[in-house]
Amino acid sequence: MAKVLVFIDNPGASLKKSSLELLTLARSLGESAVALNGELSDGVAAAFGEYGVGTVLRPSTDDLDDFLVAPKAAYLAAAAESTGAGIVLLDNSPEGKEIAARLGIRLNAGVITDVVAVDADGTAHKSVLAGSYKTACKATTAVSVLTLKANNVTPEPAAAPTTPETATVEVPAGSTTAAARITAREQKVATGRPDLTDARIVVAGGRGMDGDFGPVEELADALGAAVGASRAATDAGWISHDAQVGQTGKTVSPQLYISAGISGAIQQKAGMQTSKVIVAINKDAESPVFEIADFGIVGDVFDVLPQAAAEIKKRKG
């Protein structure tokens, strides 16, 4: 049976849905272990057992977060070697991809990013070229490193819960002494909305919002959704850059993606085309976004969005 190592970084009091997806995928591929960075809360420990984790590894030092990603990659490489893992799974975040790249160098491993599914033999499936094609690829090295896109695996607890063993992994000497140290952090103000990359529903606005994201946010709050944006909207300063969806922004794969006032250029499509259902709202009936939409509304976003939000609130109330 293959040995699979999952990297979980600072989960807090409970595991995110994307982490549960990683654990579910790992269990389907073989015997799973977790390389954890951060505190192991009671809730997280219980979830590891519920999802069939066999071993939980902890780093020998608790200061990995004082540095950029290099020490985390060194720790994960040591964890992979100690467990004999043939597959290492990480989330598909920018940091996850950078750790994966560094890990590939350390382990002489094949690295595959933007994965949406993995077969039992380790073959990874990807959605490429703005979702126009599906590809299947498999690393020919002894170890493969995969980053999984969120919302592509249904979290499922194990049939029989486990009691994970715990072990400590020595972080290689010198991996932190030569690294750039983080000297300060500023906490981002919480919006109360789901994280964009993990959200099951995303409402995104573009140039057609003309600087007013109020209707987008109102609909998002009515649906319990995350708020996204096109590059044009973030570059104009209408919303922060961490809301950008696209080739140079975040990649999302929600169950429902509502595109409001976005033309649907290739850059935007690259970040959202794997969404399960796409609803497009645009007053230009010839807009490219309608080519990829499952449902389209030709109309003014400032008329459509408030009506949709009001109807949803009415039905929920």
Image: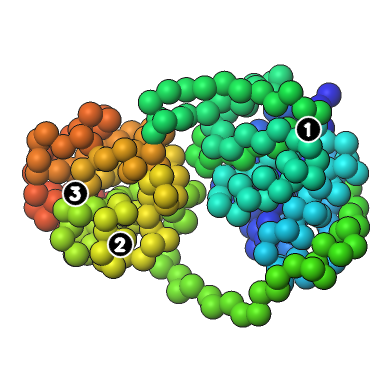
Identify the residue at image location x=19%, y=49%.
261
- Callout 1: few (<14), some (14-19), or many (20+) C-alpha neighbours within 10 Å? many
> Upstream in the sequence, badge 3 or badge 2?
2
The residue carrying mark 1 is: 143
Amino acid on which disc 1 is placed: Val
Amino acid on which disc 2 is placed: Asp
Q: Determine whether, in the image, residue 10 is placed left or right of residue 241.
A: right
Q: Can residue 253 be seen in this view?
A: yes
The residue carrying mark 3 is: 261
| Rendered location of residue 311, percent (x, y) | 18, 50
- Callout 3: few (<14), some (14-19), or many (20+) C-alpha neighbours within 10 Å? many
Amino acid on which disc 3 is placed: Gly
Rendering colour mode: rainbow
Q: Do the residues labelled 1 and 2 touch (CB within 8 Å)?
A: no
Identify the residue at image location x=74%, y=63%.
38
| Rendered location of residue 257, percent (x, y) | 33, 42
C-alpha span from label 3 to label 1: 44 Å
Q: Determine whether, in the image, residue 158 is placed left or right of residue 289.
A: right
Q: Determine whether, in the image, residue 112 is placed left or right of residue 308.
A: right
C-alpha span from label 1 to label 2: 40 Å
Q: Which element type, helix, strand or loop, lies under badge 1?
A: loop
> Upstream in the sequence, badge 1 or badge 2?
1
Choose between 297 and 106: the one closer to the eye. Answer: 106
Q: Which element type, helix, strand or loop, lies under badge 2?
A: helix
